[in-house]
Amino acid sequence: MAKPNAFYAQSGGVTSVINASACGVIETARQHRDRIGKVYAGYNGILGALREELIDTSKESASAIAALRYTPAGAFGSCRYKLKSLDENRAEYERLIEVFRAHNIQYFFYNGGGDSQDTAHKVSQLGRQLNYPISCIGIPKTVDNDLPVTDNCPGFGSVAKYVAVSTLEAGLDVASMCETSTKVFILEVMGRHAGWIAAAAGLAAEAAGDPPHIIVFPEIPFEERAFLERVKTSVEQNGYCVAVVSEGAQTADGTFLAESSARDAFGHAQLGGVAPALAQLVKERLGYKYLWAVADYLQRAARHIASKTDVDQAYAVGKAAVEFALAGKNAVMPTIVRKNTKRYSWTIGEAPLRKVANVERKMPRSYITKDGFGITPKARQYLAPLIAGEDYPPYRDGIPRYAQLKLQRVPKKLGTAFEAS
Amino acid sequence: MAKPNAFYAQSGGVTSVINASACGVIETARQHRDRIGKVYAGYNGILGALREELIDTSKESASAIAALRYTPAGAFGSCRYKLKSLDENRAEYERLIEVFRAHNIQYFFYNGGGDSQDTAHKVSQLGRQLNYPISCIGIPKTVDNDLPVTDNCPGFGSVAKYVAVSTLEAGLDVASMCETSTKVFILEVMGRHAGWIAAAAGLAAEAAGDPPHIIVFPEIPFEERAFLERVKTSVEQNGYCVAVVSEGAQTADGTFLAESSARDAFGHAQLGGVAPALAQLVKERLGYKYLWAVADYLQRAARHIASKTDVDQAYAVGKAAVEFALAGKNAVMPTIVRKNTKRYSWTIGEAPLRKVANVERKMPRSYITKDGFGITPKARQYLAPLIAGEDYPPYRDGIPRYAQLKLQRVPKKLGTAFEAS
């Protein structure tokens, strides 16, 4: 009988290093051709498995696969598609098994956040029930850094580095012109539920008075008066104020600042943006000249300024996933374990998927200063190593040369089509 | 008599490479200690000269000065302060001469855009009138790329590179998730009067269908219908649409899109943002899921992704300015001259300030495609070499180590204070 094949899929919001995990999976699988046949990637994530739209990665050259290590976004396509529970839509899970069986897939590598780990867990359960031999390994990925058990999540470190470097650079810009120009600069960053990304901006500050002067966390109920007071103090003391705000910033009653802001001429809610909302507030109450920026996708796609630590870890969890599968493991996820050393070092650990699925890790209150506007030394100690190191992509003519794949499809074997619910 | 000193000031909006010009000025002056005493820098630009707030750069170590080459923003402070005409406020110009005389300053290096070149020109005229020996040399700088005579302006190439790289990266992100997530992504970039910066986004595209699918230039009157049609076509053909819009985008009657957009609940004009305004339009008319980003200061401060060509040219114009002064020149500005070679090469030329002052160079219509939404091969040929090469700053603990100067002041010699008008 032919050697069993592997299926790999990217899930949810992509990052600048999720392809490094794909690279780790495929390169490691290629080193074990005696036991793993081909690696099939899902076109647009799990939808590719449901629709039997599989990409044959064996058609890609070694150099194309190597280039995934430094290519941002999802090379095989990703999707926002959460499988329902086994009870609610057992047919979807059975369809997965059907496709796996048709293509002799016995390894399932699912690269995503909490929802994806949950899906991988359920597939492994159904495999047992249906007596289909499938080894399900989750591969952690999320810029939100909110998976439990693992010390941190691949994807986060690079966003953190982007935000810290951008805050430092924009801070220098504002500082150099504040006497006659912009006094208040507001940068909005990602993080709807947790302030990990906003916290990383704090790494830009070395000494008292350095920007960012204010960080607005979703964990701390936003109080207009305290915020404005802090802006005013900063402008008076430093000549300017740099504030970094999380998109998830909200008031005590749970209203997102992005939602609470203005309505347009037609009465529609204004199109998001905590930064413009806070800038408006500053202008009305304090009258300072302001500017704001919303980095949005730029931050999570910025492979050009990725953290080397993050890239290395993303590759390592991909590699470990294959090794776990070959060791006969099932329903587990490689984790990043911070070693108890003076200088930061890490190793790969292992978490059962049932402990990872649907558990959200919050930022500890001890990482935020008492006044709610900054990070503590403890947070800094946790965050700093995650942005350490640079890992530049190659360039040609001033532009990064990111991977270009053939994305050749595997011929379908099943007569039935599948309509995603 | 003591050797004459030099005065250097940064003017207007800062860039990621204006300090590289400062580095070129100071390092070159230090190589000619036999003829140039000290280089004094204006604290907050020309205001520093008017107020006699001078920074003694001779107190800075060689390594601190060398670090300016890779440090963004204005290390000595810049300002938005335009001197009036000689007729309107002759006192200001006389004050400059007074300060120069008090500190034995006979070289005036003014690093800025069109207004600054005009000021440098007027100072040289007044020097002649008052019989005060002053050599006035302008040093070009502007992200807007709108100075005449010079082939391009230091500062522009690095913003162009940031915009091209960010468009490429965000484009990959959107492409990988467009089936189930964001279909339209709008990135707003600088350029109130000219579309040079927006045009640079076009360098991200290599083949037909590559993002950006739409560029909105200030030079082309914005037509809602044509824009929406183009968005729709792109989503239908490519599955998604990436649009890069200039902050200066405007309709045929000259209304800025940023202004024409919504009013908030209090009836105030919404706080700018062409990107959110266009996103709103797309949502209302086409119903696509969208996201938008406004890079703002991040783009002009992003030294971490500066163009090596730009850094080299910024340094070279600083160096040339000192060499021009030593050669006895006056009222001139070093320019960048594109050589007529197959492979891009450049050299330093010279323009009289009277030809530079207050002349704005527009982007030629031939750089924009007929449909008004893209760049032509001619534009690409002009732009591409300006973003070529990388020139990374050094890092420690994941953060760039930008210059930290002492900024020691020169003791004042004049009893009189000066109040800027």
Image (cartoon, coloured by chain):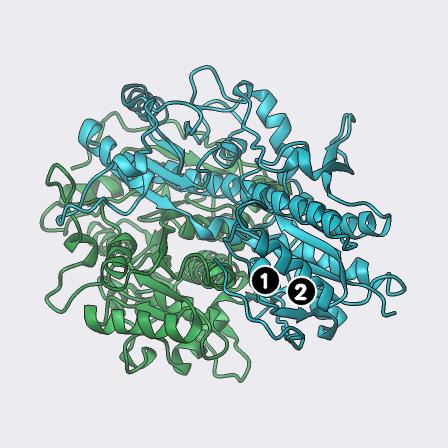
Chain colours: A cyan, B green
Residue B58 percent coordinates (x, y): 51, 37
Image vertical order of residue B382 relative to residue B32, above or below:
below
Which amino acid type is shown beneath numbered disc 1?
Leu
What whole-number distance in Å separates the C-alpha atoms at marks 1 and 2? Answer: 7 Å
**Displayed quadrant of residue B208:** bottom left
**Displayed quadrant of residue A331:** top right
Image vertical order of residue B44 relative to residue B327, above or below:
above
Q: Quick check: marks 1 and 2 in contact, CB under 8 Å?
A: yes
What residue is disc 1 on? A50
Task: State the residue at coordinates (31%, 30%).
Answer: A255
Residue A80 visible in the current orientation: yes
Residue A378 percent coordinates (x, y): 60, 21
Q: Secondary structure at mark 2?
A: helix
State which chain disc 2 sits on.
A
**Displayed quadrant of residue A380:** top right
* Residue placed most toward the observer, B165 or A409: A409
Image vertical order of residue B412 relative to residue A325, above or below:
above
Which amino acid type is shown beneath numbered disc 2?
Val
Earlier residue among tags 1 and 2: 1
Give the residue furthest to the right. A34
State which chain disc 1 sits on.
A
Task: State the residue at coordinates (44%, 37%).
Answer: A192
* Residue placed most toward the observer, A392 or B394: A392
Give the crowd class for mark 1: few <14, some 14-19, many >=20 residues within 10 Å: many
Horizontal side of B149 relative to B23 (left or right) equals left
Task: State the residue at coordinates (63%, 72%).
Answer: A405
* Residue placed most toward the observer, A96 or B315: A96
Give the crowd class for mark 2: few <14, some 14-19, many >=20 residues within 10 Å: many
What residue is disc 2 on? A99
Image vertical order of residue A314 relative to residue B189, above or below:
above
Give the residue furthest to the top. A370
